[in-house]
Amino acid sequence: MEDAPFSQAVGLRWADLDPNGHVRHSVYYDWGAMVRIAYLEGKGVGLDWMARNAIGPVLFREEARFQRELRLGDKVEIDVRLSASSLEGRKWQMRHRISKNGEAAATLEIDGAWLDLRARKIVAPPEDMVRAFAGFARTDDFTVLASGKPPAK
């Protein structure tokens, strides 16, 4: 069963800003990683689970589209949705929406897969992770990825 979109609010820190007083581009990527891991932690397949199972996420592509200025004092909400996945769950794509006052400020698109940390190969995830991903809210344009091929855009 699909969950509601997972989101987290974040407060902007002085350290998040560039010399122009805008949020630095790399902060957006950090927020995306924070929200993805928070979702997985809540499903019981977070960092400790990954270490015990010797599996972790690997990203092939991470891309941001900046739509609206963010500055110190802004209230920011970040959500995550699954935008594509292979049937066995080896490879996946996610989309983050970063919003200010309900309006899109940026969108992150990522392509990833599960890496067996011992064999150093892309693998289908264990059943616990498959169940966690089954609950991810989907984007309206969600697609099924072909198995064994890198995610294409």
Image (tube, grey):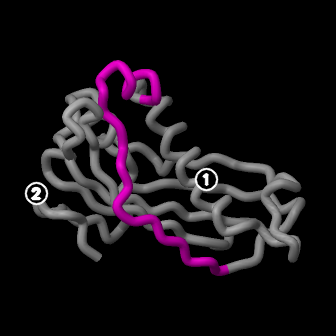
Rendering quarter of residue 66: bottom right
The percent position of residue 81, horizontal first and vertical second, equals 43, 56
Compared with residue 60, is residue 134 higher up or lower down, i.e. above or below? above
Q: Secondary structure at mark 2?
A: loop
Instruction: List the residue tagged with mark 2.
Output: 148
Q: Residue at x 27, y 42 (%)?
A: 115
Neighbour tally class for label 2: few under 14, some 14-19, many 20 plus, Cα within 10 Å: few
Amino acid type, mark 2:
Gly
Q: Quadrant of the C terminus?
A: bottom left
Rendering quarter of residue 21: bottom right
Q: Residue at x 19, y 43 (%)?
A: 121
Q: Secondary structure at mark 1?
A: helix
Q: Residue at x 14, y 63 (%)?
A: 149
Q: Is residue 76 left or right of residue 56?
A: right
The percent position of residue 112, horizontal first and vertical second, equals 33, 55
In the rendered structure, find residue 30 and report the number of the disc placed on it. 1
Circle nearer the N terminus (1, 2): 1
